[in-house]
Image (cartoon, rainbow, N blue to C red):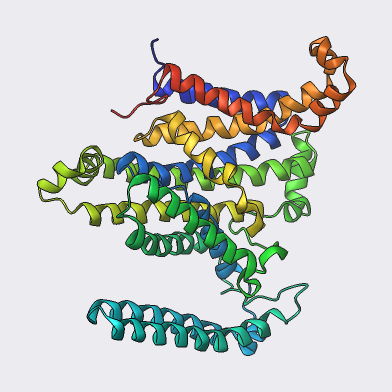
């Protein structure tokens, strides 16, 4: 079967978004597109790790969540009461805990194996743990007790939210460095298990440490500069006049305008990352990474430091995922740590995008992300349409009350078989993806 060129594939996807706008609503089309641009950046990060180096990371949700945490730490207003209550002591406790871990590693490496080393490690770690808890618990409880219904966390730096994108990438990179130092020596299947476990640990910390991000109580007052708020546009006389001149309702136009502002912002970030990744992939560094991926033993025999390169690509890919996490929270104006507990949406779908588009091809990852995101949202609508038109279904379904009720109640799950079917078809007829790696 002759494959369509990439330009034609992107053109078909673009036409599909236009049809959603014409047949349903432009607000829906733009919303799906913005989500698609963000997950495309996530897919680029996963493609760097898997497509460039063959690293099987299924802890994607954890690094994505750290990017979201950066938004709270950067854009939230400074809270003097939280600082006075215990924030410095919390930071001191965290530094102390890191120092204890570092001392434990040094003790283990420098002392000879035997009872003395075991005793020293036991005293250091157990004593350090209790000292850490003595400092940490009282400080955390003091911060969480401050107006828990409204804040109850340490607040942020009060800086523009766009800066949180860089901080989100940095947080994810630091966490990835820690993961890589302990797990990258494992075989691919064990690496997958390790990254999944560590990713869930990161999410669990965000869900349970209220002093950090309010935990399950969520953070809703997230800034969005330089994108305006719909309410501000609806109160602007010039904007209202423009809406009337175009024959549109100001509320509808404000929603579309804000969505397009996000689209422009995210598109710029995506294109910058794409250019940088394409340059890296075609450079000697990129050829070396693919050589390591294809045959680690041969690359090591040629003098390449495989472990160091794996560490490098794992950190870079995770940083990109962290940037996407910060963008996602800014777009939706909500940091909800419990939402990251969905491995289907924040892990499986991202891998599906990379596989569908073509592992090892950056443009393929973007194409796969846009297709999967569009089908993920539209499949739910298709299920609801079928549920509301049961007479269109075979009589064995529409004529059975129990089956009809089941169809209505489970319409939202139509997206699952649809995505699975698309993956099966692609793997059958184009196993290397829609835009294979050259």
Q: Residue furthest left?
A: 302
Residue 375 coordinates in the image, percent (x, y)? 61, 29
If the image is split into quadrants, where does the C terminus sit?
A: top left
Q: Is residue 76 above or below residue 388?
A: below
Residue 343 coordinates in the image, percent (x, y)? 57, 46
Residue located 18% across and 54% down the image: 305
Q: Is residue 296 above or below residue 319?
A: above
- In the figure, is residue 332 to the left or right of 5? right
Residue located 52% across and 46% down the image: 266
Residue 140 coordinates in the image, percent (x, y)? 62, 81
Residue 342 coordinates in the image, percent (x, y)? 61, 48
Residue located 82% across and 12% down the image: 396
Viewer-proximal residue among 102 and 330: 102
Residue located 65% across and 52% down the image: 332
Residue 161 visible: no
Q: Is residue 199 above or below residue 82?
A: above
If the image is split into quadrants, where does the N terminus sit?
A: top left
Q: Residue furthest front?
A: 115
- In the figure, is residue 404 to the left or right of 224? right
Viewer-proximal residue among 293 and 174: 293
Q: Is residue 213 above or below residue 373?
A: below
Viewer-proximal residue among 355 and 277: 355
Q: How many marks?
A: 0
Q: Which image quadrant for residue 15?
A: top right
Residue 392 visible: yes
């Amino acid at each position: 079967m002759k494959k369509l060129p990439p330009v034609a594939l992107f053109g078909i996807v673009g036409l599909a978004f236009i049809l959603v706008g014409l047949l349903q609503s432009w607000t829906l089309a733009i919303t799906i597109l913005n989500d698609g641009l963000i997950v495309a950046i996530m897919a680029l990060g996963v493609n760097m790790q898997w497509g460039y180096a063959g690293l099987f990371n299924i802890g994607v949700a954890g690094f994505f969540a750290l990017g979201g945490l950066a938004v709270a730490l950067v854009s939230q207003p400074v809270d003097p009461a939280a600082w006075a209550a215990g924030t410095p002591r919390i930071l001191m406790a965290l530094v102390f805990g890191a120092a204890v871990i570092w001392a434990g590693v040094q003790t283990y490496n420098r002392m000879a194996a035997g009872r003395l080393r075991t005793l020293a490690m036991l005293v250091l770690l157990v004593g350090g743990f209790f000292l850490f808890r003595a400092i940490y618990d009282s400080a955390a409880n003091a911060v969480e007790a401050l107006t828990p219904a409204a804040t109850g966390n340490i607040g942020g730096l009060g800086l523009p939210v766009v800066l949180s994108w860089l901080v989100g990438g940095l947080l994810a990179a630091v966490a990835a460095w820690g993961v890589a130092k302990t797990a990258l020596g494992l075989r691919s299947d064990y690496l997958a298990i390790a990254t999944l476990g560590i990713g869930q640990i990161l999410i669990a910390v965000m869900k349970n440490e209220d002093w950090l991000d309010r935990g399950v109580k969520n953070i809703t007052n997230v800034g969005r500069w330089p994108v305006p708020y719909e309410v501000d546009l609806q109160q602007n006389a010039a904007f209202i006049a423009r809406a009337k001149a175009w024959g549109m309702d100001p509320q509808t136009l404000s929603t579309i305008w804000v969505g397009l502002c996000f689209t422009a912002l995210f598109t710029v970030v995506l294109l910058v990352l794409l250019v940088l990744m394409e340059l890296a992939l075609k450079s000697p560094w990129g050829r070396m990474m693919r050589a390591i991926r294809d045959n680690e033993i041969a690359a090591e025999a040629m003098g390449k430091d495989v472990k160091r390169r794996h560490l490098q690509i794992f950190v870079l890919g995770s940083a990109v995922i962290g940037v996407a996490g910060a963008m996602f929270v800014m777009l939706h104006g909500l940091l909800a740590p419990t939402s990251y507990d969905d491995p289907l949406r924040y892990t499986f779908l991202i891998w599906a995008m990379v596989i569908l588009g073509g592992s090892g091809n950056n443009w393929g990852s973007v194409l796969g992300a846009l297709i999967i995101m569009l089908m993920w949202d539209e499949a739910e609508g298709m299920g609801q349409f079928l549920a509301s038109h049961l007479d269109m279904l075979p009589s064995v379904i529409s004529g059975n009350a129990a089956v009809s009720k089941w169809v209505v109640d489970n319409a939202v799950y139509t997206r699952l078989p649809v995505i699975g079917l698309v993956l099966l078809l692609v793997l059958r007829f184009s196993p290397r993806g829609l835009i294979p790696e050259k």
